[in-house]
Image: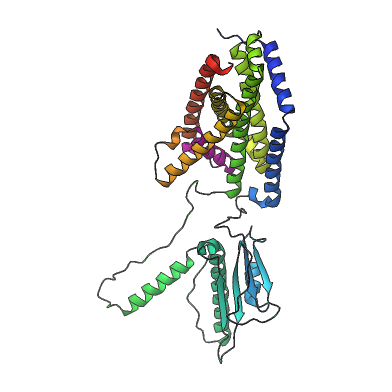
Amino acid sequence: MILIRWRILKTLLHKEGLRHATNRGGLALAALLVTASLLLAALNPAGNDQEKAIPLVGGVHHCIIWHDDQSDWVKHLQDTVPKGFENNILFYQLTEPIGPEEKIRYVPGTVGIEIRTGVASDRHQNVAVWIRHPDGDRAGMAIYEQWFWRETYRFFQQRADESLKADGSGAELAPLPIGEHDQLWAQRQAFQNLFNNYASQAPPDRSLAIPALEFREAAVTGGNFDIRAAIATALVMFSLCFTCVYLMPSLTCEERERGLLLAQALSPATAFEILAAKFLFYPVFGMVLATLLAGIHNPGVLTRPFFWLALFIFSVGTLGIGITIACLARTQRAASLGALCYMLVIAMIMLVCQQNNITVIPPLALEYHAPHLLHATLTNQIGPQHWLNLGASALLATGWVTLATVMFRRRGWQ
């Protein structure tokens, strides 16, 4: 029968607390993680709103609209900037005219759409539109370009209709309703022109060789990837790995080198009580730090029971990994190096399996399930598959804890 005495457990917990209070490096890194989370929340306060979250695609974070004068076209673009992009789409008026081939210099991370007015002809004004994108990264400005061309088409279609009505000719353009978030309008219009041209010239008694396509779009369930939630997930995972996988083995081996661990084993404290103190202190310390980081990113996550359950399982599992490393390492230096090697090996295995489409090996690692669970809770996109991840994480955490307990009883205190 396993008997854990509270007076001895309290003394061991007090000892662990004093050890961490004097560990300035660990406290400094914990403060650095909190500062990073605060900066992440302060520099992008709109990120908590899923509808206003700014998708950072290809490293492009600003789009500059250059224009010669403040025309109605530019005014329409300014009035139709999507919500959440007010600080990412900037309008600059050229103070001096530049040549048609002269280039404007852009800083890294910015793209541009240049509206340059040319020489007017007898019936119309010539305007050149330059699309400036990073070399080799045209996709980086796709979200801005879709918005620009959609609103430009809407503006000139309305202007053309108003001009035809003012002439009194009774003619009008074919209506083409374009929604505010319609991303397929260009494809729809191009195919409609092809279909109409072909149908008007094909023999009336022959079936058409192309169908009448309908263009629709919808977001996939659970497919939204929030970059801020991904960073917050990484911070939460790092806090638990730092506390339980790196810091705990290092301090445990330091105790072994100084003879403190052997002194505890020779004291009235049993191996289970020594192990119980570590299981009560380090996961709690890691969970407090992880909760603080997650709460800064999204306070609503603290009200979700799934978050607490996933956090508890992951913290216990990482502590099992840390104790296993502490039992295998003989010195503090070996424990620190072993923890870093473990995390590097896991990261490399995950990367290689992802690149080569190997789906059998990654689910065997606790670090595979944790990002899915934490990101799902931070974005409130919990699905049935995440419960499977949670069950697999519980089994893996149980395996690591069992292995750590057996190894610590046999050789962990020696």
Main secondary-structure element of the magenta-colored stretch: helix
Work out whether residue 151 or residue 148 is closer to the camera in this orientation and state it: 148
Tell me if residue 395 is in the magenta stretch: no
Residue 32, how many percent across, how many down? Answer: 70, 40
| Residue pictured at 39% horizontal, 36% vertical | 360
Quadrant location, the C terminus: top right
Question: Relative to 347, is 141 above or below?
Answer: below
Quadrant of the rendered image containing residue 377: top right
| Residue pictured at 63% horizontal, 35% vertical | 239
Work out whether residue 407 or residue 174 is closer to the camera in this orientation and state it: 407
Question: Relative to 158, is 257 above or below?
Answer: above
Question: Relative to 188, is 288 above or below?
Answer: above
The span shown in magenta is: 366-385
| Residue pictured at 52% horizontal, 67% vertical | 178
Left or right? Give the position of 100 relative to 210: right
Quadrant location, the N terminus: top right
